Image: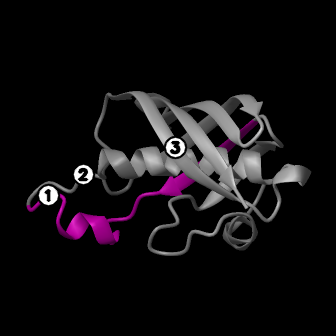
Amino acid sequence: MLGIEQIKEILPHREPFLMIDRVDQLKVGKSATARKAVSGNEWFFAGHFKDVKVMPGVLILEALAQTGAVALMTMDEMKGKLAFLGRIKNAKFVRKVVPGDLLILETEIENIMGNIGIGNGRATVDGELVAECSLMFAISE
């Protein structure tokens, strides 16, 4: 398990754009499972939407990407580098994420070719699918 301070040692993201609170499982270079406790005080709820607070889908995808970046950036040969989101494919949103939800984020790295990583992400709340997508990461110095 990695706490927030350990995540900050791996990822360059900081509040309010750090979208994961804890990493529960990590297989270096292969997969990571993280979580985000969604609070009603999140910065994005101020404008999304006026009467119904819904976590923006792009931020769910960002959380999946950050989870995958943890799996990649803990590899010895990737330490100190940056993982940029290069592509999202086949994004699918199934359910709203609202205040009080515990978002579970699972990203598996399918392939690493030089400075490119390809993976699949899946987000759930209470075991129910929220979103899924394919991700491509571009690794830079």
Please say whether residue 125 is visible from this viewpoint: no
Q: Is residue 63 visible?
A: yes
Sequence order check: which comes first, mark 2 or mark 1?
1
Q: Which residue is mark 1?
A: 49
x, y percent for residue 13: 57, 69
Seen from this angle, which residue lies furthest left?
51
Neighbourhood count class around disc 3 (C-alpha, 10 Å): few under 14, some 14–19, many 20 upward? few
The Cα–Cα distance between marks 3 and 1, rounded to whole angstroms, is: 28 Å
Q: CA distance from mark 2 to mark 1?
A: 7 Å
Pinpoint residue 129: horizontal percent, then vertical percent: 43, 28
135 or 51: nearer the viewer: 135
Q: Is residue 132 above or below residue 104?
A: above
Q: Nearer the viewer, mark 3 or mark 1?
A: 3
**Amino acid type at mark 2:** Val
User: Is residue 83 toward the left or the right of residue 76 in the image?
Assistant: left
Q: Residue at x 76, y 60 (%)?
A: 2
Callout 2: SS = loop
Alpha-carbon neighbours of circle 1 within 10 Å: few (<14), some, or many (≥20)?
Answer: few
Q: Are marks 3 and 1 in contact (CB under 8 Å)?
A: no
Q: Which residues are magenta?
A: 31-50
Where is residue 42 drawn, in percent x and y? 35, 68
- The numbered disc on residue 54 is 2
In the image, taking residue 70 as reference, residue 91 lies left or right, namely left
Height in image: 129 above or below 136?
above
| Residue 110 among magenta residues | no
In the picture of the structure, the residue carrying the numbered disc 3 is 86
